Image (tube, rainbow, N blue to C red):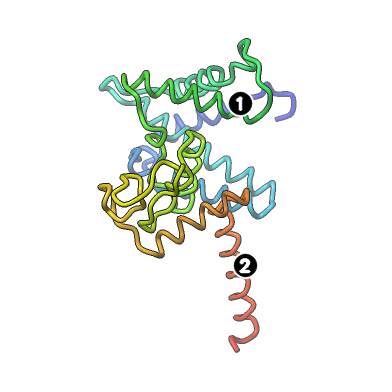
């Protein structure tokens, strides 16, 4: 509402969620596991609204995403085994993370531009992971493998690239890594994914798809969004064909 302190509606959402958790039979029986499909679905619906160019639809879908966050936090607050947390804990966690990873804003670090901000973020994040693990960790350890395959491939390549990994590692056809990019030659442990290095064998189609992801990234494109755009174009063609009598 006009004139309210920013965030006042968030407090009302928390209060409504508390009431629903107690008074609604459906809300009362939900768990993290039962809500998991909704969390994924609402994120996809928000992305769909974003792509539609409809600001009102995006606003509504972001509300549904926010509901999932509040709902999960409300469930977590009920834990009696010492693992619980509240919506305030969730908010404080991200506040602390943002402050910690923006020393050029909240401390005395100076940066030359956005790229240096990204590098600092990655370095701080890597240091946090190493401290938490008590030992060095891979830059890929926190990449979620539950995401769609195209975005997964893009994120793996992006993380590896920013860590300085040679571009030749993305060649998965079993060919040696090009000279000067981490090795090469028969028996090279960095050769492509033919299973020789302990990894799974990769089909030609899988290797081609992975290479297409690399091509999209080189062109400054998001492969997931590009395929979604192609899917929408195909949908429109099929609908036009249907309207024309399927002739």
Check the image and name the residue furthest to the right.
3
Q: Quadrant of the C terminus?
A: bottom right
Q: Position of residue 179 (x, y in %)?
A: 44, 46
Viewer-nearest of labels 2 and 1?
A: 1
- Of labels 2 and 1, earlier in sequence is 1
Point 45% across, 55% down: residue: 210
Residue nearest the observer in this picture, 173 or 213: 173
Residue found at the far top of this picture: 108
Tell me if mark 1 has few (under 14), some (14-19) or many (20+) residues whose alpha carbon lies within 10 angstroms of its own: some
Query: Left of 44 or right of it: where is 245?
Result: right
Tell me the residue that label 1 is attached to.
Answer: 117
Tell which of 172 and 41 is nearer to you: 172
In the rendered view, would you say 126 is above or below 35? Answer: above
Where is 79 relative to 34, above or below? above
Toward which corner of the image does residue 19 lie, by quadrant?
Answer: top left
**In the depicted view, which residue is nearer to us: 42 or 20?**
42
Res. 90 mark: none
Image location of residue 177, percent across then percent down: 41, 49
Residue sitting at x 65%, y 84%: 244
Name the residue carrying label 2. Answer: 233
Residue 72 in picture, x, y percent from top left: 41, 34
Residue 45, x across and y down, in percent: 54, 51
Does dot 2 land on a helix, a strand or a loop?
helix
Label 2–label 1 contact, CB within 8 A: no
- What count of labels does the image hold? 2
Which picture quadrant has residue 206?
bottom left
Gap in angstroms between the C-alphas marked 2 and 1: 36 Å
- Element at badge 1? helix
């Amino acid at each position: 509402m006009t004139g309210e302190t920013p965030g006042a509606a968030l407090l009302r959402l928390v209060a409504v969620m508390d009431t629903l958790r107690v008074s609604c039979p459906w809300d009362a029986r939900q768990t993290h596991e039962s809500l998991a499909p909704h969390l994924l679905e609402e994120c996809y619906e928000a992305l769909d609204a974003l792509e539609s160019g409809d600001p009102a639809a995006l606003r509504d879908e972001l509300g549904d995403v926010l509901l999932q966050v509040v709902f999960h936090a409300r469930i977590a607050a009920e834990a009696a085994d010492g693992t619980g947390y509240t919506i305030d804990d969730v908010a404080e966690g991200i506040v602390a993370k943002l402050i910690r990873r923006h020393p050029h804003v909240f401390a005395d670090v100076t940066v030359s531009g956005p790229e240096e901000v990204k590098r600092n973020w990655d370095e701080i994040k890597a240091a946090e992971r190493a401290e938490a693990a008590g030992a060095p960790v891979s830059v890929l350890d926190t990449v979620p493998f539950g995401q769609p395959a195209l975005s997964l491939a893009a994120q793996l390549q992006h993380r590896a690239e920013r860590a300085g990994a040679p571009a030749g590692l993305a060649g998965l056809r079993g060919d040696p890594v090009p000279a000067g990019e981490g090795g090469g030659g028969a028996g090279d442990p960095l050769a492509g994914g033919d299973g020789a290095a302990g990894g799974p064998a990769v089909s030609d189609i899988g290797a081609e798809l992975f290479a297409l992801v690399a091509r999209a990234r080189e062109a400054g494109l998001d492969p997931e969004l590009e395929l979604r755009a192609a899917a929408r174009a195909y949908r429109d063609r099929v609908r036009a064909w249907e309207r024309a009598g399927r002739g």
